[in-house]
Image (tube, rainbow, N blue to C red):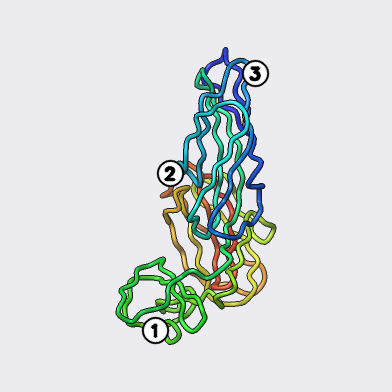
Amino acid sequence: MLRIDVNPADILPYVSLSTPVNHNTYTGTSLTISGTSSDSDGSVSKIELYASGVLLTTITSGTGSFSYTWTNVPKGAYTISARAIDNKKGLGISTAYIKISPNTCTAPQWNSATAYVGGNEVVYGGIRYHANWWNQNERPDTHNGGAGSGMPWPSLGACNTRMDVSINNNAMDLYPNPASEVTNVSFDNSVSGSVQIIISDMLSNAVLTKETSAEAGNNIINLDVTSLKPGVYVVSVTNGTDRLVKQLVIK
């Protein structure tokens, strides 16, 4: 838990997340965010709950326990934060890094008349596909391929499976981290082939993308990060089957 003192006379508030649990994976499309807060020399004025920098809700009940259910949650990796603000504007923060993996395949069936844009998901023949870019009337089973293939529809596997996402695990490392000019992405790849490396800000906006080839086993890729502003980012490495995710700090 982080405490930020904006008033030297103030003893900063305490906040702790009970759920979600740090580095856990949750299935479904809803997530309960709960915890407790207190302030030894005053009161907690409000609790702000965030998902990767986006405000979900503000709870004004103050000191004590709190709970909120986030619904219609998209799959992916998130930084969940609870921020307690006391009556003297002191701030306490509790954070958990999690992954959301829906139980079922909720993507719509592919339709030849529909125009799809990058990021859309569809199902065709019991297989999930992810759109790389705008396309229409390009059937996913005959227009699919991994990063660097030039195909619009990479396969995400059978409808009852999910792409594996590993958050901050030992299969991936970033160094130096924090970085200012260059960071090296070291990762273990399950198969030889193309991989896509994406750096996203805390609002999930992609700010840097690199496609390259990788061998089965350990790989090290250099990334020029001089164009990034100071802050916290998320680096993901995807080979069409596995996805590794780790935080990067730019100083």
Check the image and name the residue furthest to the bottom: 142
In front: label 2 or label 3: 3
Residue 44, relative to residue 121: is it above or below?
Answer: above
Going 51% across and 17% down the picture, which residue do you hit?
88
* Amino acid found under the numbered disc labelled 1: Arg
* Amino acid found under the numbered disc labelled 2: Lys
Mark nearer the N terminus (1 vs 3): 3
The reply to whether callout 2 and callout 3 are in contact (CB within 8 Å) is no
Residue 179, relative to residue 125: is it above or below?
Answer: above
Disc 2 and disc 3: Cα gap in Å?
A: 37 Å
Mark 1 element type: loop
Mark 3 element type: loop
Q: Identify the residue position indicated by label 2 in the image.
A: 229
Q: Nearer the viewer, residue 36 or 168?
A: 36
Mark nearer the N terminus (1 vs 2): 1
Mark nearer the N terminus (2 vs 3): 3
Q: Nearer the viewer, residue 126 or 94?
A: 126
Q: Nearer the viewer, residue 158 or 210?
A: 158
* Amino acid found under the numbered disc labelled 3: Ser
Image quadrant assignment for residue 33: top right
Disc 1 and disc 2: Cα gap in Å?
A: 39 Å
Going 36% across and 70% down the picture, which residue do you hit?
133
The image position of residue 48, as x and y in percent, is: 50, 35
Q: Identify the residue position indicated by label 3 in the image.
A: 40
In front: label 1 or label 2: 1
Q: Identify the residue position indicated by label 1 in the image.
A: 139
Residue 200, relative to residue 116: is it above or below?
Answer: above
Disc 1 and disc 3: Cα gap in Å?
A: 61 Å
The image position of residue 212, as x and y in percent, is: 50, 70
